[in-house]
Image (cartoon, grey):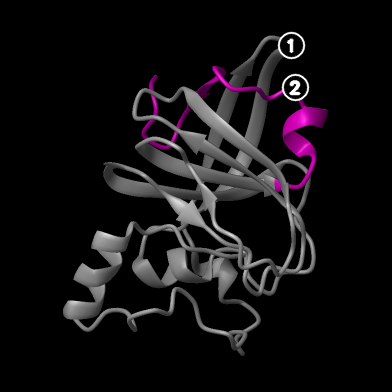
Amino acid sequence: MKLRPFSVAFAVTLAAAGLATPGCAASSRPDPRPDAAARLDRAKLTIRTAAGPRAVSVELALSPEAQERGLMFRRALARDSGMLFPFPFPRPASFWMKNTLIPLDLIFIRADGTIARIAANAVPLSLDLIESGEPVAAVLEIAGGEAARRGIAVGDKVRGAGFGA
């Protein structure tokens, strides 16, 4: 899926350290290992909505490599699952859908767990930037349309994986 989760300053820092290629946020080749996604740590999140709690099982994109790859090249995503991109500190975030084959809802989460913004049904394969609009502590990606279907809205609270109790 994606992504361009790093700020420009962070990407420059990674490039200077030899951890990223300047101007390239993600590889264009699929990982040949079919189990590559299975190696990511997993966690359970609960989103407190007006209609009640909504559980999401997430893969944690903790490393720069996992954040660069995100959900790229996947052909499906279960309705109750997603990927969480936690950041070491709140910052403006921008993503793209390069090599992402399925539509996604991107949920931008503040440090206190409050949902700041939802970018619904991001267009597969698009290079357009999807920005947080403010500093965020994490981004949650779920299947396109799931936020609306499950009643997830701006202002709802995320719990689990480091957010609240």
Q: State yes or no: discs 2 and 1 in contact (Cβ < 8 Å).
A: yes
Q: Amino acid at mark 2?
A: Gly
Q: Does residue 123 appear left or right of residue 46 in this picture?
A: right
Disc tally is: 2
Is 20 situated above or below 51?
Answer: below
CA gap, disc 2 to disc 1?
7 Å
Q: Quadrant of the C terminus?
A: top left
Compared to residue 14, the image places residue 44 above or below, namely: above
Q: Position of residue 36 (x, y in %)?
A: 56, 76
In the image, what residue occupies the spot 68% across and 66% down?
Answer: 126
Viewer-side residue, 36 vs 72: 72
Q: Is residue 105 above or below residue 76?
A: above
Magenta extent: 143-165
User: Residue 2's image quarter?
Assistant: bottom right
Is 135 magenta? The answer is no
Which circle marks residue 51 in the picture? 1
Image coords of residue 60 (percent x, y): 47, 53
Q: Position of residue 16 (x, y in %)?
A: 17, 79
Disc 2 designates what residue? 151
The residue shown at (32%, 79%) is: 20
